[in-house]
Each structure stands twice: as C-alpha cells, then as structure tokens.
Amino acid sequence: MLKPRATATRELVSLDGIWNFALGSLDDQIDTTWTQPLSPELQVPVPASYNDIFIDSKIRDHVGWVYYQRSVRVPRGWAGEKYFLRVDAATHHGRVFVNLQLVAEHSGGYTPFEADISHFVAAGAEFCLTIAVSNILTNATIPPGKVETLANGKRKQQYQHDFYNYAGLARSVWLYSVPQVHIQDVTIITNASQTTGIVDYQVTANRLIPENRFHLSLLDEDGQVVARSEGPQGRMQVESAHLWQPGAAYLYQLQVELLRGDDHKELLDTYTLATGIRSVEVSGMQFLINGKPFYFTGFGKHEDTAIRGKGYDPAYMVHDFQLMKWLGANSFRTSHYPYAEEVLEYADRHGIVVIDETAAVGLNLAIVAGIHGTKAPPTFSPNTINEHTQTAHENALRELISRDKNHPCVVLWMIANEPASGETGAVEYFDPLVKLTRELDPSRPICFANMAFNPVNRDLITDMFDVICLNRYFGWYKHTGELDMAEEALYEELSGWQDKFGKPMIITEYGADSLAGLHAVNDVPWSEEYQSRLLEMYHRVHDRLGAVVGEHVWNFADFQTTSQIFRVNGNKKVPDCHIQPCDITYEDLLDWAPVDESFDEIDSEDEEVSETVERLDVDGPLTMHVVTSEDGSSSPGGTSGEWNDWRSFVAAGCLFIMTMFRASGYHASEIAQALYARAYPINTLKHVFTIDVANNDTRTFIKDQIYTARNGLEWPASKSQSFARGTAEYEGLLGTRIGSVVAYLILGAFTRGTRRVSKIGVEVSATGIMSLQFDIEEIKPLPETKRRRSSDDGDGGSGDGGSGEGRPKKRRRYIDPNYDGLAKRTRLAVRLKKAGAAKV
C-alpha cells in the first residue's frame, strides 16, 4: 500500500485536528449514537489516543466503541478524479461512514486502511465523516485478549501483553486524489555487488491497459538521473552506487510515471519513492549489511508519550532519535506493533536500523498464569489461541510487509513477541506464518522473540527462523540482586543456544527497572547503580559469545501499563523513571466505601499501635481509616470481583498501616499520603509503621537476610533491630515491596530532595509477627560556604568576583517530564558507543 503523497498528478488533504467525540454503548455492537450530529461538547484531537486526554476515568477505561465525527469538503478541483479516505491506524477495529453509509471496515490497530469514496460524494460537496473505533480484543484479534464483566457490572478488557491498551485514532486521517487510472503499488528489492547497486522493481496500476506504459527514473541526492527503465518490472543497475549504510544513509528517489498515447508522452500519474541501496544477509553466526558484520546496539521502544498515548508526535519522535544518537544506539525494535510510517521514514533518512514487529504479543497464556498465580490453560487450543487468531496473524503480516517492504532501514521481520514456543501446537501455528512471510518478502531474514519459559531444550520453533532473539532478565526476574549468579546462568543459557543452532543471536530485551534518585552501594534492585551494574554484567557475557550480534536494552523510556500492584505508574525503564507528585485527596477514595472515626483509646487487638504511640509521646487522638472496594464481600483468594482493603491509623507525625491489599485503583503510597494529609499537613509526617507484615517478598528478606544470613539468629527470635541509611540492611529493606511503598510515598509527597528515610527498624515477635518502622528526616541544605567551589577544583573559577565564577557550576539538566536524571544514561552511552566503534 502506497503512502499518500502530493505529486504533479495527486493532491493530499490532512483531516487532522479537533473532532467531535462520543462514547458508544457498553457492549460489542455499534449503537445509533453517531447517526445524529455529535455534540461539540466533547472533542478530541487527531492524531492521539483518547484515553489520557480526559479526566473522567469512565472515558479512559471505556471498553467498546467510540465515535469520531467531523465535516469534510471534497475540493472542487477533484472532479473527474478518484478520491480516497485513508486512516493511518484505528486501534483496534475501525468502521468509516460517509453520510451514514459504511465505506470501509478494518481490524488491526496499527496498520492503515482506505476507501474509495468517489461514488459516495461529489467533488465540491461537503459530507459528514464518522469513524467508529473499538478497543475490544478477543482470541480472533492480534494482539489477543478477552472482555470480562466484573461483579459490579463493569466491563474490563483483559489482555496478555504488558502495555496499556491505548485506543482511538492515534495516527493521521487523509483525503487524497488520484487519476482514474493510477499507479497502485511499487515494490523494490535492492542488493549490492561490489560497487554496483542493484534495484529490482515491480509496479502495478489499478487498471491494466495495454497501450499504457511505465517509465522509471532513479535520481541521486543531487537530482541527477543515474538509471532508467521501462515496463511493470525490471532491474536497474547503478555503477559506483552510494550504499545505504547504518549511520550513513544515502537515499535515491525512484520516480515512477504512468504514460499513455502512441508516443507515450501523456502523463497519467506519477509517484516518487525514496529508496536506499543495501543488502541484508545472514551468514553463519553473522548478520551482514552490505556484506559486512553488523552489531545491533539500541533499544526496544514504545510509542507512548504524555497525554497523547500512542498518538504520533513528530516533536517527540525527533527528540527520541536525538537521544538514541546521543546514547550511541544504531538500531531499535518496533516493540510490540508496527510504528507510524513517519518513524520509518525518519530512520531511512538517518541510517537507523529497524527490527519491524507485528502486534502478535500475548500468544502465551503461561505468562498471565504466572503473574496471577493460577494454572495456565494450553495456549494453543480451540478455546484459546486458535485458527481465528492465526487468520488475524496472517492479515497482520500481510499488512505490515505491504506497508514497510520498501524501507531500507527495515532489515529483519519479527513475527511474534514471547509466544508459547515450547507448547504443543506451536509448530502447527507458526509454520504457515513463517512460510507466508518468506513468500511475501524473500529478501529479509525472519525472527521471533523467545522468552525465558521456553529455553533451548524446550523451544520447538527456533529452527524455522534465521536469527535467534532472546528476551532475558537474569538479575531481575531471576537471581534478583545476585548478579554473580545471574552472570553465570546467563552465559550458560546463551552458550546452549549458540552450540545448538550456530545462528546469530540478538538479546532483544534485558535490563532492570529503577527509581530516579534511589542509590545503593550494594546490589539493591530498583537503585540506579544496580541497573547500571546489571547492564554491565550482560555486556560482559555478550562479549564472550561469538554468536551474539546485538543487544537491545528494555526499554528506551517509561511506558504505560495496565493497573497492577507490581507496576507503579507504568513500566520504569531507561533513561529514567518519572514520579509524579501525588495529588489525590480523601474525597477521591469515597467510591471505595471508606469509614473513619477518631478516639483516644484503641482496643486491645491494636495494642502494638497503642504502645508505639505512648513510646513516641504522640499528641492528639488516633484516627482510624478503613477503605474497601464496593464489593467488600470478596477476599484476596476469592474468585469474584476485585478485592481492595486498607486499614490504618493516623496520629500526629505517624502513619500506622495495618492492612494493605490493593487489586486496583490508587497505589498504596498515594492512599497513605491522602489519608495522612486529611488529618495533618503532610510535611509533619515523621514515621511510617507497617504492622504484622504479610508480604512474602518483605518477610522472606527479613527472615533470610536480616536474621539468618547476617545476624545468625534462629527464626523466629523476638528482637528489635535498627538500620541506618547506607547500611546493606537498610538498602535491602528499602528495596522490598513494602520499602518501595514508603519510597514512593516520599517521592510523591515531598518536594524532590527534601526528605529521605533516615532509619529502618525491624521488630519480630516470638511468634514471627513482623513490624517495620521507617523514620523520615528532612534533608538540610549545605551552608553556602560549603557549596561553593574552590579555585582549584578544575573549573578555573577564582571564587572572588567576576561573572558568577565563585558559584557552583550548574549540572547540565535535561528538562522533560519523562526523564529526570543522567547517571545511567551516561554509563550506557559509554557502553553503546564502545560497542559501536568495536563491532559495527
């Protein structure tokens, strides 16, 4: 499918802008909402995902159809032409109506579709354009999913992939004209033989008329014709060709003309396509571009940006590419769906290598079961991933390759991410898809991303593919905090893949989450230092294995995910995480049926709270808060509804958390802040207590590390201990689940850099009941004299006058809501640039 362009014979009108908007009914069917003019009271921008634009969560989390509507006028000068309406993407299902008439329907949320509307509206006329978009995912869609109805009647979209289901018209909408007889498609395959560039082409028209003729010219970047050809298919050769190289792009322009008349001088249509001459090949354990070994350094990405969701934004796109260049990256993967075509055009122009991926993510029910602690059904079965999924997958591959086949930046097709490649049925599912991909494009290698549940001795399908791509998280999900063990396990596994297959390997995902500003001397997960050390560990292993031809850190930037207790405001990746200040109030919790009461004495079951209040000499009454979901009858182990339960006491300077089960809604740190701030100014908070800790992650660390490993105590042993900031015990406790809640509380409640946890106390009773105490202290700024730089600090300042020479030098700061630090980006930049110099 050709991207619309304005040429001497074609015109193009953008329909981007503000559209009227409405939600559909809460079912799977289109209702009649859109058949009347939509009110302008609710409007949305196009392109953008609609979810984060509005404050109302009912819109953000709506499941079903939504409607976009606006008026459009066909230019009067298009009389006698054909004119098409094109939608670059409608996530995930789109239906287009012109004056109430259905003109197009499409499934697949990341590839374009279009309709000839010449017979529905005359040139010069105005019409009502309505686009209905559904975000519903089923087992007959790519990606797959299912819709569940909760106990309270709310519909919820469930899906097996770990990124938020942004929806709507996230890319542009166009109206364009073409002649009645026009060029319909162009396919280019290039190669390089020593200094000669080879361009094989095939061109089609919408109507085959014998007397019409195709004429093709290839122009260099100076506008000079370097090759010509005639006919619908053929080959052009360019002597001393400028090859498209990673990091050094060179683009030719292929000008296609459709001519008629006895002398073939009458121009019917013309279309120009940018192309780069380059070759791609897999040879043994090497990945070759233009006959030379290429080493992938870069990232997996997502298209997420603030407010716009997955909406295409050229400013963010250019800035992302600048950051990747600064880091030394030469490539990226379009995880986990086809990106906007403008992204590939930019990569073409700037020599960035791309692994192009379909939206086939979530074909692995074992991952979902592992997260929720349930037994996994078979992934491939009539009731799960089945022939309907496979058909949708085939269509996704056809549309991806049809759109992106001519981009020189695309060197590798990735047909799925983390499927159940070791389960029964995987071969039958993937074999026809691999064959289809090779049939559609024999010029590029094929891969899929393997995940850890399917190691080399279990995987059933890798032999079908050209390149082995592995997503591995040793040191994060496995051997957490034990980098020496993680390094050994990683090397052992990668060696197994290399020995068995002898194919090139790309580590397409690896890394660790981190919290900006969380520092630790030891290997403490979530700290900036741990993330850096984990990356360095991986790089040492990669350098030891000849089959490893690439490394893509997961992920380039933070992205949004579905609400889960292990995902705090999305997935935190490189370069840094951004913690937004918490601004929820007690009133925001009212739909969770809260109960509160104040009293001077509490009953005996909360004796520990009472004793602590007496010990700390707390002034004023205790206030108890109980916050539950509307479906309070459910339980953590229940099967119906979602179970939310919060029970805490607040006193002056103190917050006591007794119960903390969160299945959905606000993060625990936000609830804690809102409840304390209702009674006292947040700046007065000095102590956070968690009573009777039941969280397995935290309990295990205290039992195995604090008591047994480091203090040699038998378990349980009634003992109180306290650990100051900077100790290994302190760092470890702050890295646990409950420690992370307190860390987020401080990051969200206070101005960054003004508060910190000064000390963590652990108390364990003789029966094994654990309690934690986090003491919060104010960070005092250094006196001005200590903050001044001395004259011999290497900056050349005299400290005695002049234009600010005595003041401390400002640290260069990148101001962006999504990135807040430089430490690990700088370290990663050094690594990536070294890799680029050594291996590219």
Image (tube, rainbow, N blue to C red):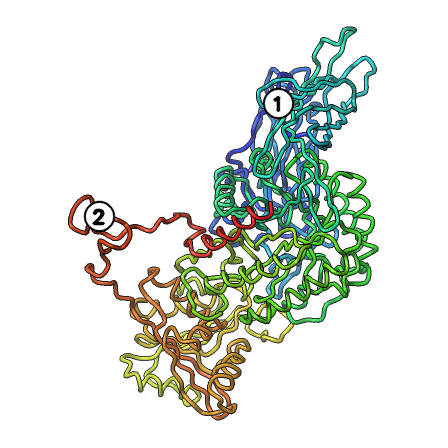
What type is the residue that disc 1 sits on? Asp
Q: Residue furthest left?
A: 800
Q: Cβ–Cβ below 8 Å for labels 1 and 2?
A: no
| 55 vs 759, nearest the viewer | 759
Relative to 776, does residue 210 appear above or below in the rendering? above
Labels in figure, total: 2
Q: Earlier in the sequence, mark 1 or mark 2?
A: 1
| 200 vs 775, nearest the viewer | 200
Relative to 15, does residue 212 appear above or below in the rendering? above
What type is the residue that disc 2 sits on? Glu
Image quarter hosting the N terminus: top right
- Residue 753 coordinates in the image, percent (x, y): 33, 61
Between the C-alphas of marks 1 and 2, the distance is 52 Å
- Residue 30 coordinates in the image, percent (x, y): 67, 44
Taking the spot 64% from the left edge, 58% from the top edge, the residue there is 471
Q: Residues within 10 Å of mark 1 (few under 14, many from 20)?
A: some
- Residue 174 coordinates in the image, percent (x, y): 60, 30
Instruction: Residue 247: give its label.
Output: none
Taking the spot 34% from the left edge, 81% from the top edge, the residue there is 599
Residue matched to label 1: 220
| 534 vs 800, nearest the viewer | 800
Residue matched to label 2: 805
* Residue 20 seen anywhere in this rendered image of the structure: yes
SS assignment at label 2: loop
Where, by quadrant of the figure, is residue 689 drawn?
A: bottom left
SS assignment at label 1: loop
Image quarter hosting the C terminus: top right
